[in-house]
Amino acid sequence: MNARRAPEFPPWPQYDEAERDGLIRALEQGQWWRMGGNEVNSFEREFADYHGAAHALAVTNGTHALELALQCMGVGPGTEVIVPAFTFISSSQAAQRLGAVAVPVDVDPDTYCIDPAATAAAITPRTRVIMPVHMAGLMADMDALAKLSVETGVPLLQDAAHAHGARWQGKRVGELGSVAAFSFQNGKLMTAGEGGALLFPDTELYETAFLRHSCGRPRDDRRYLHQIAGSNLRLNEFSASVLRVQLRRLDAQIALRDERWTLLSRLLGEIDGVVPQGGDVRADRKSHYMAMFRIPGIGEQKRNALVDRLVDAGLPAFAGFRAVYRTDAFWEIGAPDGTQDAIAERCPNTDAISQDCVWLHHRVLLAGEQEMHATAEIIADAVAAT
């Protein structure tokens, strides 16, 4: 592999005086938790408006957002939640921690999003929720999934941890009629280090979620009259002040990432053996949380060695997610009947992608055009040396 100049990428997270001003504002208001301050309430209104939702609820992190949504949607012991087999494990563990069974189904080999046909085949009388994940900010097939939801009566919960600002046929995440969960973890498209949010299309479910995220306690309670079971999942005022600024930057960053991905994906597609993540014309705005590509047939061991070479060459590269059913954590609690091999047989695309997929952090796509060429050249050299 020839030595090449290490590309220069913008740092992440990004911040300036606006975040500092927000933190000082939160500090000086004298109330640092959501029940007495203004930052969380303001962020929730702004986030809901941006995504076209009736309500938003800020919470401690994206995993808690999923868990809270599932609980409010009736998930618990004796129920099942359908999840894509190729995803970060929070998608399945959120259901499993509630005592439900997580049922992994296969994904599309081009988009890496949940396969609607595989989803339909997995529905049983115990299925309570279908959870599509908008992988790397590319929306899953929301037309087919919405149709399936109507036909079966099983609601959707969008795992939109990668999809801040994404759209499906002109509709924002909050305009699709289903609950959606977001993450603000340090690497996400908006971040306060940690944090999460839920979007709700109706007031009743939102109010239930509010109670459960605040120990079951109404907003105006002074006598500890906890109405329903819950936990403390409240976001603090400092994090919300940072997220308000991060939200204002999002549109410009998405536009730049989209422009850079158009170039980088073309360059990657010209490399022998490399297949960039595909798209769907109906997903008319992709937020590009990751720059993902496959090297079909490379195998997990060589793929991992390739990632190491890319990191050594200066790229923020990572191996693709491991199939959830190929982790020990998946089998600890709430696993479906059957064996790992039996699930793998039903998920051939996931099994392949989890062994041959590589992704680059989205800050790559915030760099200049020259860096896209340099990135592609490094990947070409590394793949040729594999």
Image (spheres, helix red, strand yellow):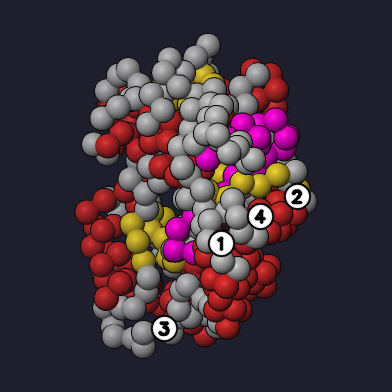
Q: Give the CA separation, mark 1 to mark 2.
A: 29 Å
Q: Is residue 103 above or below residue 254?
A: above
Mark in the foreground, 4 or 3: 4
The answer to whether one can see residue 6 in this image is: yes
Say whether residue 157 is magenta.
no
Q: Would you say 61 lies left or right of 190 here?
A: left
Mark in the foreground, 3 or 1: 1
- First in sequence: mark 1 vs mark 4: 1
Q: Give the CA separation, mark 1 to mark 4.
A: 13 Å
Residue 342 x/y as whole percent = 31, 23
Mark in the foreground, 4 or 2: 4
- First in sequence: mark 4 vs mark 3: 3
> In this view of the protein, which residue sits in the foreground, 112 or 28?
28
- First in sequence: mark 3 vs mark 1: 3
| Kind of residue at disc 3 | Pro
**Numbered range of the magenta stretch:** 189-214
The structure residue drawn at horizontal position 53% and vertical position 61%, both measured from the top left corner, is 32
- First in sequence: mark 3 vs mark 2: 3
The structure residue drawn at horizontal position 45% and vertical position 58%, both measured from the top left corner, is 194
* Residue 317 in which image quadrant: bottom left
Helix, strand or loop under label 4: helix
The structure residue drawn at horizontal position 65% and vertical position 60%, both measured from the top left corner, is 38
Mark in the foreground, 1 or 4: 1
Tell me the tag on residue 52: 2
| Kind of residue at disc 4 | Asn
Helix, strand or loop under label 3: loop
Residue 211 x/y as whole percent = 58, 35
Q: Would you say the residues marked 1 and 2 are in contact, meaning their CB atoms lie under 8 Å apart? A: no
